[in-house]
Image: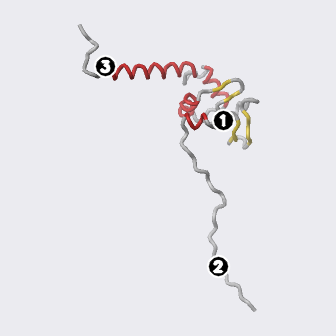
Amino acid sequence: MKIKKKTKTKKTSSVTLPKTKRATPETLAKTNSHSAFCDCCNKRHDWRKKEYMECKPPLSVLCFGKYKIDPVYRLALYHHGSFYNTEEVVGSFLGHNPHFHSQEEWMEQQNEESSDQGQEFSDEDGESSDKD
C-alpha cells in the first residue's frame, strides 16, 4: 500500500497583468481609436457608431461619432479630467466646457505658446529688444 504525502502548494494568481506603456500622443494615434472596453458598464463599445454618454471612454478612444479628437488634445483633456464621461469629452472638444478649451482654441493656444517660447530664446542671445 502506498501512502500519499501531503505537500503544500503555493497558490498562485492566474491573472497576469499586461505591461502598460505610458500614454503618449504617438501611442494613442496607433491604437484602435473608436472601440474599447468600458470599465463603467463592463462592455466593449464602438464610440463612432453609438453614443454612450454616461460611460467613461478610455484614453485610447479618439473617435466619437463624426468627431475625431487629436491625440495631443485628448491626452491634455484626460490629464485635466480623467473622470470625464463621453458627454464631457465631446462637450469639451466642442467648446462647451467652461473649465477647458475646445480643441481648436487649445491647439491655437499651444501654437502661440511654442512660438512665444521661440521668441524668448532668440531674445536671450545678448541683444536687448528694449531700445530707447
Q: Is residue 18 above or below residue 112?
A: below
Callout 3 touching callout 2 (CB < 8 Å): no
Question: What residue is shown with label 3?
Answer: 123
Mark closer to the observer (3, 1) = 3
Disc 1/disc 2 C-alpha distance (Å): 47 Å
Closer to the chain start, of discs 3 and 2, is: 2
Closer to the chain start, of discs 3 and 1, is: 1
Question: What residue is shown with label 1?
Answer: 57
Closer to the chain start, of discs 1 and 2, is: 2
Q: Secondary structure at mark 2?
A: loop
Question: What residue is shown with label 2?
Answer: 7
Give coordinates of residue 57: x percent, y percent: 66, 35
Callout 1 touching callout 2 (CB < 8 Å): no
Disc 3/disc 2 C-alpha distance (Å): 75 Å
Give coordinates of residue 112: x percent, y percent: 45, 19
Q: Quadrant of residue 123?
A: top left
Looking at numbered disc 1 in the image, what kind of residue is underneath it?
Answer: Pro
